[in-house]
Amino acid sequence: MLLGVLNRVDDVYTALHGVGEIWEPNRRLISVSYNRLWRPLVRLMRTLTGVKAHHENWIPPKETENLLEQTGFEVVERRTAVLLPLPLPLLGAFINRWLSPLPLLRHFCVYNIVIARPAGNRRQASPAVSIIVAARNEEGNIEALVQRVPKLAERQELIFVEGGSRDDTWGAIQRTIGVANPSGSVVSAHKQTGVGKGDAVRLGFDKANGDILIILDADLSVPPEELPRFIRLLQTNSCEFANGSRLVYPMEKQAMQFLNLIGNRLFGVAFSYLLGQPVRDTLCGTKALWSQDYRRIANQRTHFGDFDPFGDFDLLFGAARLHLKIRDVPVHYKERVYGSTNISRFRHGLMLLRMTAVAARKLRFI
């Protein structure tokens, strides 16, 4: 952490040049600096208290970001802190926690915080890939999915987790095991013991041996042929968490109902603010991340609570808390050709609101 350091060095470029090139990709640089609006008050307080002033640049956040990018870093997140720098019991704590993060008031905070990561360092050249598919009532999609999954790596596995199906999804999965497929994937199947897609995905992750973990919905609403771009973004270190976004390209007519579309857009706006990174589509089932980062997310799961039935928010919350670079990956969203959605619009909508409140309290208003 650079607490006011960049404001005191004579040449930021010289101080940081080459640092990002020798850092590991999971390292983070955190720069904390004063807001220029507070400069007159800081100078007045130093004069009144007799504190000797140091040379300071008072670099605004945008210029800090510009310098970081010139020296091989990529900005992951921007924050502010402390709206009332006075030791007022209760009132000060209330203002600094609940008011300082608000969109307008945050520009008047004392501290600007910029979090950056080393950019451009390629990750593992030939990673093994594990594709996790949570399948319930998807009997008619299983064979097509196995045949359509592309070759993503030399070592590749396709892990099905089935639970609670009313049709013969389990039998359809069993019939694909050991059968040759175009991608050369090793296919395995596991029975879910818990409830919900999130639980199924976590079981699949626990069984996975790959360096990269990717989730694919069994309903084929996101074409498997689009998976290579997720892997490529991780390999080139363009991001550390690739999040599918269905809200960029035009979608097929019956792919998403109107109320669901509105809800997804609203949640995208809310979460872009809460996570501190742009996330248009929080509930797209296609996501990819490095297995080592998933283990770090799993180790901190108790911080947010284990109540996400979908698994999407659980991963996004954890990635944001670790300051992983999240990048939306536009995908084409297709209409189902078999079965119906397992999502209950209103019941699950209330759960999502509850999880949004948790994200606000744990990530932004802290």
Image: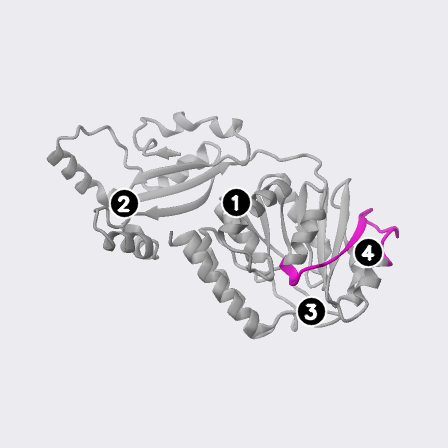
Determine which residue is flagged by label 2. Answer: 110
- Report the disc number at residue 335: 3
- Separation of residues labelled 3 and 2 (CA atoms): 49 Å
- Separation of residues labelled 1 and 3 (CA atoms): 30 Å
The residue range painted magenta reads 175-198
Q: Which colour scheme is used?
A: one colour
Q: Mark 3 or mark 4: which comes first in sequence?
A: 4
Q: Using residue 164 as the reference point, say whether residue 65 is left or right of it.
A: left
- Report the disc number at residue 147: 4
Inspect the magenta stretch and tell me whether residue 195 lies in it.
yes
Q: What element carries label 3?
A: loop
Circle 3/circle 2 CB separation < 8 Å: no
Depth-wise, is mark 3 or mark 2 nearer the camera?
A: 2
Front residue of 111/148: it is 111
Q: Alpha-carbon neighbours of circle 3 within 10 Å: few (<14), some, or many (≥20)? A: some
Q: Is mark 2 on a helix, strand or loop?
A: loop
Q: Which amino acid does label 2 sit on?
A: Val
Circle 4/circle 1 CB separation < 8 Å: no
Front residue of 285/308: it is 308
Determine which residue is flagged by label 1. Answer: 325
Q: What element carries label 4?
A: helix
Q: Which amino acid does label 4 sit on?
A: Gln
Q: Which amino acid does label 1 sit on?
A: Lys
Depth-wise, is mark 2 or mark 4 nearer the camera?
A: 2
Q: Percent x, y for residue 113?
A: 37, 42
Residue found at the far front of this picture: 193
Q: Mark 2 or mark 4: which comes first in sequence?
A: 2
